[in-house]
Every structure is written in structure tokens, then in C-alpha cells.
Image: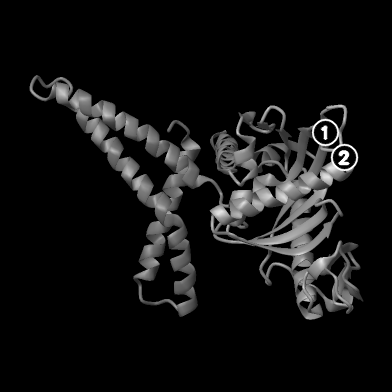
Amino acid sequence: MSHNNIFRKLEDRELRFSEIERELNSGELEPEQIKALSKERSDLEDTVFKYREYKELLNNIEENKTLLGDDEVGELAREELVKLERNKMELENSLKFLLLPKDPDDNKNIILEIRAGTGGDEAALFASELLRMYTRYCENHNFKLTIMDMNETGIGGIKEVIATIEGKNVFRKLKYESGVHRVQRIPSTETGGRIHTSTATVAVLPEPEDVDVEIDEKDLKIDTYRASGPGGQHVNKTDSAIRITHIPSGIVVQCQEERSQHKNRAHALRMLKAKLYDLEEQKKFQERSETRKNQVGTGERSEKIRTYNFPQSRITDHRIGLTVQNIDAVMDGGLDEFIDDLTTHFQSESIKQLTA
């Protein structure tokens, strides 16, 4: 680990960890102070213990180096050094990741929005398939996906769908899915066999806690209307659908999935809070430097992030250059390779900033 600023960060964390332990053992703290310090200690624990393991390893390396000239144990020391150096590299990589600042939104639930883009009916069909892809992914990972509002077409497509996804670290898993998804294939209505290109946009918004966003009722314009749809259970005869306009920002949300006006209102307010929280986060994002943008990953909703080529059974993520040839498995929820590689990529970018 060649960078002095990393050592300084590790030493500072170990020093703070020791200070916290002394304070917790003093017996002079109020319950709220104990709670706050215990949480801080817990946040530091993994890094400090790993750093102490690393320092002990460095001592072992130095001890073995002193034995290299010994006729009796020199060869054993040389073999041990090979193992220790390998462990040293692994520990250094682990420590770098542990030093990365944690995204406070990682453990939050999300609001997922999928909208058909360019391509007419084909784009709407693709949006429907993306919803199925994320639904299957959630089923595979024990996440709970709930539709909050959906605008369907008459042929099985979706113009727009908004859903909540609840689960452990769900935002950390899916936050890099935001952007433009492009599909290339021959539509069923195409008689000439030509490949068409269509798009759908995906937005993944962390769902804020109540303390994150405050909404003044005076800033809201709330309208009720009769739910509509292609037929079936989404159509009813009462004005149960809700549309909420946040006057200061101009943000409009609506929900008609529930038969209860009260439930639709609650769902719409959840969407509104997520959009207001995201709006504030996007403002902060724009204020960051270009290097910081690269560090935290993409934040541009208009960026084309992935292409799904059905004739060649190929999916390519343009941010990391990853291409896989099993499109059926991915569309059935097999997103793990993309998600894992994207996470590793953006963590590596963050490490570059950390060691700069």
C-alpha cells in the first residue's frame, strides 16, 4: 500500500476507534451519547480490525526477512514470505474498499420508473419486458416489487410504470440501472425482416425516510379522477385515482392502482417524496466536480447505458464494455453479472480518487 494518504486515513480511524472505546468505558456518558458512539464504533470496526490484521502481517513479513540468511530455516522463511506477500496484496485491496465513503442511500428502498422511449409500440413492449426482467430479479433476491402506477397499451406494452422495490441494500444493487436502455430486434409487425431500434428509460430513485423530506400541505394541489386502463381490475366507477402537483417544483405524480383513494394518495405521496429527494440530490450532483462525478458513477438520465440485441442474443453495457451472449437468461432476471461488474468498476474509480 504505497500511498501515504491511505495510511493516514487508516491511522486516523484507528485512533478515533480507540478514543471511542475509552469514552464508552468511562461510565460518564448519557444513553444518547452511548447510542451515538456505539454506532460510530460499529461503522469503524471492520476497517480498524482489518488494519490491525494488516499491521500484524507486516510485522510477520519483517520477521521472516530476518530469517532468510539462516541455514536451517531460511528456505521455510522464503516460502512463508511468498504466502505473506500474497495475503498482503489481498488485505490492501480490502482496506481500500473499506475506506471508500459509504453511500447513505445504499440501504434504502427504491422507486423504480420505466418509460417507453422512441419506437412507438415496440418501445412500449420493451418497457414491459424490462419490468418483467426487474420483477424476476427481485424474486431471485427476495426483494418485494409493488406496482404503484401503470399506463398500459392495448397490445401488452407499457407506456409508463412506477413501482416500489423493498429489500436489504436494494438501492446499492440497482442504482446503476438508471439510464437509457436500447433494444435492437425485428418487431412482430415488421414484414420486411428489418431490425428496428427502440428505447426505454429507467430511473432508480432512493425512497427517502420521512426525516429526509418535509412537504408542506399548502404546496400541494390534489386532484381526484376516475381510474382508467385497457380493462379488467384497473377500471372502476369511483374517483379513486389521485394526482398530486407539487406547486413549488412543478412535479406531478399520480396513482390509480388501488381501489382506495386513501391508498392511492399514500402511494402518490411516496412517489412525490422520492422525486423531491432525487431533485435535491441531482442539484448536489451538478455542483460536484467532474472527477467527483466519475467517482460516484453515472448520474445522467439521458445516457445510453445498455443495448439489447435480440437477433445476436447479445447484451452490451457501454459504461464498462461488458458483453454477454445469453440474452434470454438476462431478460429472465439474470442481471447479477452486470450489477457485480458495475459495482466493482465504480468502486475502482473511487479508489483511484482515494489514492490520487
- Visible residue check, residue 7: no
- Amino acid under disc 2: Gly
* Crowding at mark 1 (Cα within 10 Å: few <14, some 14-19, many 20+): some
Q: Is label 1 in contact with label 2 (beta carbons under 8 Å)?
A: yes
| Mark 2 secondary-structure assignment | loop
The image shows residue 171, relative to residue 181, as above or below, that is below
Q: Which residue was labeled with disc 1?
A: 197
Q: Which residue was labeled with disc 2?
A: 119
**x 33%, y 30%: residue:** 86
Q: Quadrant of the C terminus?
A: top right
**x 28%, y 32%: residue:** 84
Which quarter of the picture shows residue 70?
top left
The image shows residue 339, relative to residue 260, as above or below, that is above
Across and down, in percent, residue 259 comes to 79, 76
In space, the residues marked 1 and 2 are separated at their CA atoms by 7 Å
Q: Which residue occupies the foreground of this view, 339 or 118?
A: 118
Across and down, in percent, residue 69 comes to 15, 20
Q: Which residue occupies the foreground of this view, 264 or 191?
A: 191
Total of numbered circles in the picture? 2
Which quarter of the picture shows residue 306?
top right
Across and down, in percent, residue 272 comes to 79, 66
The image shows residue 155, relative to residue 36, as above or below, that is above
